[in-house]
Image: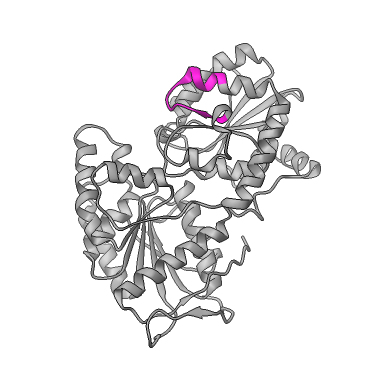
């Protein structure tokens, strides 16, 4: 671990024994969850915490966390509950003995399941659902997931939601938890409105963009190609969009389990760009960013796009109303799984560049004022401090700092 600069600390207890060690347990290792964990790791390392990120091999999280200065360890786990659960719980127990954390922060459903079974309240525990597992399931699986969350809430010092809507969904499902809400944030130093040269450079770097006609109105969807992100709805809407706005072009940025199915369903002219590290290039190239999710906690893609000065169209799932600037619900919010409503919103904005510019300016100002990742990081550290204080712990919790080096 690299040498850390001296930092101010806020004692948690009368005789601090040293800076805290936090174990972030995460599954999945791609997408929004991975970005949240990596951002928290970076800010916490910069503040002086001992940060350990445990996650499965593969994906981008291990590399991003290591680049942030965190210690990374392998935790073998799959997304779905099932036959591997006992081994996954045992893996957490081994990690606890090796790392000896002061607090465990479990991210998403599988990590929350394994961590709480392994800990059963013996250490300060924060569980962050990143969207409820029972919203992604149906039938008996959804009932089991709701029952588990109701039962396991007793083993979390806080259930940390990324939006008030996510907390309300949990409460409506019967989860009686010690709640906390901290909105997702994005690095507004990285995600910022590009100048003309930057935008042109992004266009030049990507063959998919170079092949689009100069007059194209570029509609970009960034997200994992899976049921949650709703690309099926977007493709169902696109024929209607293309009929009314022939110069519109749709670009799907990302990869995932539904890639081939979506390719087969796509009408002519839809571009599949694949996964991208330089996602800012795609926001810079976009005239409009669309995320037609079926469920979320609070999606990062719209926040990133708005920080880059781009208007968005999002579905009315958890977090969407909270992330949009006041008054943009009329133009930018549509019901989930409704191709007709989605097509109408996209058509209206593709045909009105003046409205797009107005929405984009307000969106950029809104994200910089309310959704900067530094604010998120500081709030999470304050949450840790509160949990440890209530537990009577004597470990010191630093005041949040942010390096912003990635």
Q: What is the span of residues highlighted in magenta in the rendered image?
A: 332-344
> Residue 14 lies in magenta, yes or no?
no
Q: Is residue 347 above or below residue 118?
A: above
Residue closer to the observer: 40 or 363: 363
> Residue 343 lies in magenta, yes or no?
yes
Q: Quadrant of residue 319?
A: top left
Coloration mode: one colour
- Residue at the farthest right position: 197
Q: Is residue 102 visible?
A: no
For image coordinates 44% across by 50% down, the residue present is 33
Q: Quadrant of residue 131?
A: top left
Q: Is residue 351 above or below residue 293?
A: above
Image position of 45 (left or right of 153)? right
Q: Quadrant of the C terminus?
A: bottom right
Residue closer to the observer: 215 or 155: 155
For image coordinates 70% across by 40% down, the residue present is 361
- Where residue 128 appears, x then y in whole percent? 37, 54
Q: Is residue 97 visible?
A: yes
């Amino acid at each position: 671990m690299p040498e850390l600069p001296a930092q101010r600390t806020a004692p948690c207890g009368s005789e601090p024994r040293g800076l805290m060690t936090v174990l972030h347990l995460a599954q999945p290792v791609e997408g929004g969850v991975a970005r949240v964990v990596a951002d928290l790791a970076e800010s916490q390392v910069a503040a002086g915490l001992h940060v350990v990120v445990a996650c499965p091999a593969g994906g981008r999280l291990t590399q991003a966390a290591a680049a942030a200065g965190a210690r990374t360890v392998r935790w073998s786990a799959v997304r779905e509950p099932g036959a591997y659960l006992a081994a996954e719980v045992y893996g957490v127990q081994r990690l606890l003995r090796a790392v000896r954390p002061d607090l465990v922060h479990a991210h998403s459903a599988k990590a929350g399941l394994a961590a709480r079974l392994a800990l059963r309240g013996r250490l300060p525990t924060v569980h962050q659902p990143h969207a409820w597992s029972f919203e992604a399931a149906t039938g008996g699986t959804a009932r089991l997931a709701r029952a588990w969350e109701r039962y396991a809430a007793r083993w979390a010092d806080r259930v940390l939601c990324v939006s008030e809507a996510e907390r309300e969904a949990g409460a409506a499902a019967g989860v009686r938890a010690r709640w906390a809400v901290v909105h997702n944030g994005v690095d507004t130093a990285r995600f910022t409105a590009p100048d003309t040269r930057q935008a042109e450079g992004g266009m030049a770097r990507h063959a998919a963009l170079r092949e689009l006609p100069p007059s194209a109105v570029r509609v970009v969807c960034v997200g994992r190609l899976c049921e949650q992100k709703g690309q099926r709805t977007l493709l169902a809407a696109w024929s209607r969009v293309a009929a009314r706005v022939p110069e519109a072009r749709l670009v799907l940025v990302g990869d995932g389990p539904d890639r081939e199915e979506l390719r087969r369903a796509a009408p002519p002219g839809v571009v599949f760009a694949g996964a991208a590290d330089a996602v800012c290039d795609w926001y810079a190239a976009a005239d409009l960013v669309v995320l037609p999710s079926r469920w979320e906690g609070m999606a990062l893609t719209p926040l990133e796009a708005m920080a880059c000065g781009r208007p968005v169209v999002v579905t009315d799932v958890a977090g969407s109303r909270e992330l949009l600037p006041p008054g943009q619900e009329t133009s930018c919010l549509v019901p989930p799984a409704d191709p007709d409503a989605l097509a109408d919103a996209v058509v209206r904005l593709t045909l009105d560049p003046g409205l797009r510019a107005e929405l984009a300016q307000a969106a950029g100002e809104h994200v910089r004022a309310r959704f900067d990742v530094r604010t998120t990081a500081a709030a999470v550290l304050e949450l840790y401090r509160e949990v440890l204080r209530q537990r009577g712990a004597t470990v010191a919790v630093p005041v949040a700092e942010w390096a912003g080096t990635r």
